[in-house]
Image (cartoon, rainbow, N blue to C red):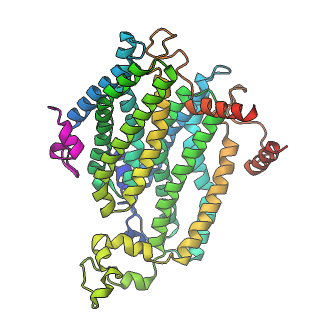
Amino acid sequence: MRFLNTIDELLRGRLTSAADLRRGTIEIPVRTLALAGLVLGAVYGLCMGLYAPLRAENASVLQVLATTAKVPLLFLLTLVVTYPSLYVVSALFDSRLRHGATLRLLLAAMTANLALLASLGPVTAFFTLCTESYSFMIVLNVAFFAVAGLVGLGFLRKALDAVFEPEEEMAAPPPSVEYSEPADPDESARTSGLEAAHFPSRLSRLRRPARPAARRVFTFWTLVYGVVGAQMGWVLRPFIGSPELPFVLFRADRESNVFSAFFRSLAHLFT
Amino acid sequence: MSLGVDALLRAEGRFALGHGRLPLGRLIGIVLLGGFTYGAAMGCFGLRPLQALYSGLKVPLLIATATALCLPMFFVLNTLLGLRDDFGAALRGVLSAQATVAVMLAACAPLVLLAYATSSDYVFGMRANGGLFLLAALAGQRTLERHYEPLVRRDPLHARVKRAWLVLYVFVAIQAAWVLRPFVGDPNYEPTFLREDLWSNAYVVILRDVLGLWRR
């Protein structure tokens, strides 16, 4: 129950409140969150791996077990590999988060990402039951990983905005919620008073220019995490398991990488 | 009317907008009854009672399956975007929309019977049903919009969640309908609850058909 409560609190944003992030602290039960990440990843892995035992040729139950373990491992190993560089860059931009808090923030974003991925698990399982096409399953899974990844990035971006909020904005009073009558009545349609009365916090957030430091750190983190994540996925493959090949835990061609394979496929398409 | 269909369509009473106790029993009752009514009419092509019974059972199953598969994502996305406090109201909207689809389908049952009476062409029958399903989907959309309007006014992020729900729901519902086919029932074949090749993928079949046409 505590486990579910922690995931719920995290998704609601209570474990990464803006006030805590501005102070540079994140009070997150790391062990519970890591466990949550493992379980959520395993749930999606189970749904993803179902394709292997259901295919006509080379059916394999072992692939289910392997994928159940590999999906959480993919996220965890990517975090382990990228964390040092991510921390260094954020420190270079004067992040308020120390190394422990940075790790906790990344773990929180990863768990949010995995929570959405796990929630798409039933849809993946349903399509796995209905689909013989290996290519379709690859496209579907890549799309779900991409959607979940984007939401995880949104979570991270919001947090980084608070982390890098300048001191003067922290000291400034919060925007007024009250509707104020503009001095010139003709100006009323153009002023934000009425709009602010409806949803002040969101509007003020939308109008605020993106913080350069937050933006740079976010861009770097996204690039590094994305590139390493893609290559990690390539190293840990197969996840779905090609129906033409027997089960293997890892593919043998360790020298290749995801990008050269992508460009080879692209070239293949046009020749 | 004891299920409160009128109140559902007007979003009044226990089906009113906003928070409050979800009338789950009534919503399920409406989906079962409305779906069965339309399904039974849909399966009347060729006047085969067994196919009518099968289709009557499958339409509510189709609505329930697509909804159940998409709800986990809907819940997580609402929570992640900080909209959890409004989840009760959003869920009311989504489930009321499903019930509205079933009501609209039931209301279209006479139309489908008329279509069958005027033509014995199987393809025409399928197209007529396709059009009526589209009409029912638009009716459901109307209820969803009505429930979401105050939510979006309070927080524009609700519009994104609604779009995500619609995209995933349509994607899943098309495949669920494919798995649960036949609904109309080709008169050249025996009535059947599910096709033998039920576990195939609608999108792959469509794509192969399109590519086949392209290569011709």
Give the quarter of the figure containing the C terminus of chain B. Answer: top right
Which of the two residues, A140 or B170, is positioned nearer the viewer here? Answer: B170
Residue A217: x percent and y percent? 58, 70
Residue B83: x percent and y percent? 34, 56
| A240 lies above or below B9 | above
Residue A79: x percent and y percent? 58, 55
Total of numbered circles in the picture? Answer: 0
Residue at 38% of width from left, 50% of height from top?
A7
Q: Is residue A110 left or right of residue A66?
A: left
| A210 lies above or below A119 | below
The quadrant where residue A72 appears: top right
The quadrant where residue B26 appears: top left
- Does residue A176 appear in this view? yes
Which of the two residues, A230 or B198, is positioned nearer the viewer here? Answer: B198
Q: Is residue A44 left or right of residue A264?
A: left
Membership of A158 in magenta stretch: no
Which of the two residues, A145 or A100, is positioned nearer the viewer here? Answer: A145
| A102 lies above or below A212 | above
Residue B129: x percent and y percent? 43, 29
- Does residue A37 appear in this view? no
Q: Residue furthest front?
A: B118
Q: Residue furthest bottom?
A: A183
Q: Residue furthest right?
A: A271
Residue segment shown in magenta: B1-21
Residue at 56% of width from left, 25% of height from top?
B200
Q: Is residue A134 left or right of residue B78?
A: right
Membership of B10 in magenta stretch: yes
Give the quarter of the figure containing the N terminus of chain B. Answer: top left
